[in-house]
Amino acid sequence: MASSSLLSSILVIFLCSSAVVVVESGIGVNWGTLSLHRLSPGTVVNLLKDNKISKVKLFDADPYALKALKGSGMEVMVGIPNDMLAELSSSTAASDLWVSQNVSRYMVKGGVNIKYVAVGNEPFLTSYSGQYQSYVVSALINLQQSLAKANLAGMVKLVVPCNADAYESSLPSQGAFRPELTQIMTQIVTFLNSNGSPFIVNIYPFLSLYGNSDFPQDYAFFEGTTHSVIDGPNVYSNAFDGNFDTLVAALGKLGFGQMPIVVGEVGWPTDGALGANLSAAKAFNQGLVKHVLSNKGTPLRPGVPPMDVYLFSLFDEGAKSVLPGNFERHWGIFSFDGQAKYSLNLGKGLLKNAKDVQYLPSRWCVANPMRDLSGVTDNFKIACSYADCTTLNYGGSCNGIGEKGNISYAFNSYYQLRKQNPQSCEFNGLGMVTFLDPSVGDCRFLVGVADGHTNTSGFSLGRKKTIFALVILWGVYIFLI
């Protein structure tokens, strides 16, 4: 934990000036780049424009994304990964270099409108066991000095996105930061306040529902509940408001009860687990948008100022870790190819699909129905270790397609990941290419995109020969369940 002398440093450096924090309301999106099939950044920016989305949050300072955002006028938040905090906290040269390469170079006429730099992402998450805790304040101080040197301190604000597990309480009005975080949170919010930055929090009612079988399902949504939380004169009918106000109370206990709050991540997954589906995601996200745009606020923050939120997320990200759960790869309001998963109105009309997406040819890799599949296990495991097979798991959209269907899904996912390389459908002779779409009901067998960046790392499975001689002969034999 940072020493109290760091707080003194903050007070000296920034003179404890109580800067005015201006947070504009609106619906932004998180643009993650851990997709196995990435659209070109230009296609993504056009998608954002077509949907009149004016705020975007990145998890790093991806140069391809930032180049595409030049001249767009969109408000951008760039991020610094947690594993960079140690270096940035110990070296002003490192912070100077980071600001120069990732902020200054884009903050020019016709460049990128970078408003925020996120210093870490949920660095106080309980599962990190304090791994990054001692670096955050020093990194903030160094980066603020670097921004000042670049004459950007007044335009670019440093923030620290926190998970909602940073605070706790059985009732919103009793909210408080975890005891072990009280000192460092005091330092951070003092810094934020003196530099005109909001507090960023990530709120996920889905995780409350997913992790607690006793959690009332209707309380996770915005459509009314029979399980309202009564907190003195205030009544909470949804988990989002309750969580938000718990943070309001926690900030109040530190003397910053009026600090602006931005919800950096909020959303609902569409696959990979029970409760993660299209209908639930649509209900939650549409309810959230309606709630935010109503300017109703929360019991402790009614009306003005309006809420500012970033939906999580723009796309599914098939390369993300599934440690939190198989749903972690399926938060997108758009599928990997920029197609809206469900009708959603962000306040400016229903979602519009990405235009001019270039797909690979319409062909799929499936299990060869004429071969003995008894020895397929190793091939299946290897395919899924590279590609995303989480929809096959319990609660997923492809969970009920049978053994041959599972094998075909894994084979095809790997085949598309490898840009339909013929050798990637061999699987020791157990795979074959078909031109007949093997999708079943809600279970979509994807075709990769050709206009972006696809993670093709991995290796060819099976014999080094082409299988196209079998395509016409066996194309009609889709696996039989």
Image (cartoon, helix red, strand yellow):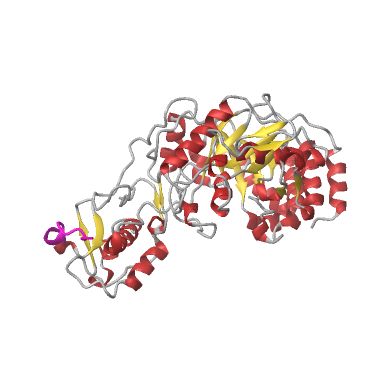
Q: Residue at x 34, y 59 (%)?
A: 418
Q: Pinpoint residue 94: horizontal percent, then vertical percent.
A: 69, 53
Q: Residue furthest front?
A: 226
Q: Is residue 459 visible?
A: no
Q: Residue at x 28, y 57 (%)?
A: 420
State how many labels appear: 0
Q: Where 340 sits versus 477, above or below?
A: above
Q: Quadrant of residue 352?
A: top left
Q: Quadrant of residue 265?
A: top right
Q: Pinpoint residue 235: horizontal percent, then vertical percent.
A: 67, 33
Q: Quadrant of residue 105?
A: top right
Q: Quadrant of the N terminus?
A: bottom right
User: As rendered, which of 306 and 336 lies closer to the eye?
Assistant: 306
Left/right of residue 71 with respect to residue 431 in the rendered view: right
Q: Pinpoint residue 146: horizontal percent, then vertical percent.
A: 73, 44
User: As rendered, which of 432 and 8 lies closer to the eye?
Assistant: 432
Residue 477 in magenta? yes
Q: Which residues are magenta?
A: 471-481
Left/right of residue 258 with respect to residue 104 in the rendered view: right
User: As rendered, which of 431 and 211 lies closer to the eye?
Assistant: 211
Q: Pinpoint residue 110: horizontal percent, then vertical percent.
A: 55, 30
Q: Residue furthest bottom?
A: 375
Q: Residue at x 48, y 53 (%)?
A: 327
Q: Is residue 376 visible?
A: yes
Magenta segment main secondary structure: loop
Residue 301 in magenta? no
